[in-house]
Image (cartoon, rainbow, N blue to C red):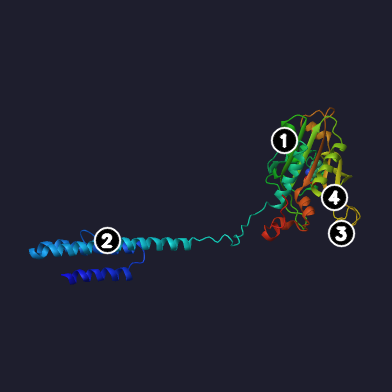
Amino acid sequence: MNERLDAIRQEILDGIKEKANSRATAFELRKQFLDSKTGKIGQLMKEMKTIAPEDRASFGKGVNELKEWALEKFTELDEKMKTLELDLRYKSEKIDVTMPAKEICTGNLHPITQMRNQLIDVFAGMGFEIYEGTEIENDYYNFTALNTPADHPARDMQDTFYLSPEFLLRTQTSAGQIHVMEAKKPPIKILSPGKVFRSDDDATHSPMFTQMEGLVVDEKITLCDLKGMLDVFVKKIYGEDTTTRLRPSYFPFTEPSVEVDVSCFECGGKGCKLCKGTGWIEILGAGIVNKKVLENCGIDSDRYSGLAFGIGIERTAMLKYGINNIKLLFESDIRVLKQIDDN
Ligand code: PHE
């Protein structure tokens, strides 16, 4: 009998040595011996009945001792496995705080959005409110109300994408001027950013580009107000040392009309490649709102006058960031875009 008990004892020791390598396997092993129904030691207890009565006492004692011993062994084993598993976890989850951190790549806003935001900041600081018009306009708002009736030669200045005889993709954010003046009476001070479309495509022109329209209508608005505002704008965008000059120009919806130059921020006005030796760079069109346009919107042109300007956002950004081809702004090449982080 004792041999059987010894054999089980040996089997347990071997099992512990060879099979147990985790808490789960140790538990399985324990069940093989100590499970009250199926375990080998449990089975021995059931054999009690078949043992000769005189041997029963010593058999019972032997089995109990084995059971006690096994219990102790398996408790010890479980503790050992617990420590082992914890050690493994500590090792696998160890954090080396001296390791350099993984680089996190954050994106930045598109240069056109950056420039748009900067312009909005500058003009919002002067009290302008934002009006966003629609990209599809009808002929009246884009041209006729802006003193450019059908057959007017100035229509040729902007090669238009017509959607139908009546509807078109707006060629200028100036269309928004009419909507605003129809909806609101002076004083008016709005800034209108948005996409515009013209059939035009070369290194500095794209069929879709972005403009920022400014419109101020109030009593006694003059070209001086225009120049003052544009001076603030160029100083904020191109540097404190820059200034503007106005040259006569023509737009049907402004009278007088001006082309606005900024003093060259590259050479300070001495003349360089950027300003083509002139010391000045053309940046936008502007003027005093044509009386006819005010009247088209039901505004008393004897009492009120207005100023308007149209800034090309791509052009402003290209000049500021030294971009020589407008396509670079539309190709979404990360290598180019990530170089321009100006906010
Ligand atoms: N709408 C004109 C253009 O796109 C620019 C402009 C706006 C001129 C407002 C004068 C006043 O060319």
The quadrant where residue 225 appears: top right
The quadrant where residue 63 appears: bottom left
Q: Residue farthest to the left?
A: 53
Q: Secondary structure at mark 2?
A: helix
| Distance (Cα) linking label 1 and label 3 | 41 Å
Q: Position of residue 300 (x, y in %)?
A: 81, 28
Mark 1: few/some/many CA within 10 Å (<14, 14-19, 20+): some
The mark that comes first in sequence, 3 or 4, is 3
Q: Which mark is residue 53?
A: none
The mark that comes first in sequence, 2 or 3, is 2
| Distance (Cα) linking label 2 and label 3 | 92 Å
Q: Work out which quarter of the rendered image holds the N terminus and state it.
A: bottom left
Q: Residue under circle 3?
A: 273
| Distance (Cα) linking label 4 and label 2 | 94 Å
Q: Residue under circle 4?
A: 282
| Distance (Cα) linking label 3 and label 4 | 14 Å
Q: Residue under circle 2?
A: 71
**Vertical relation: 288 (above or below) 198:** above
Q: Amino acid at mark 3?
A: Lys
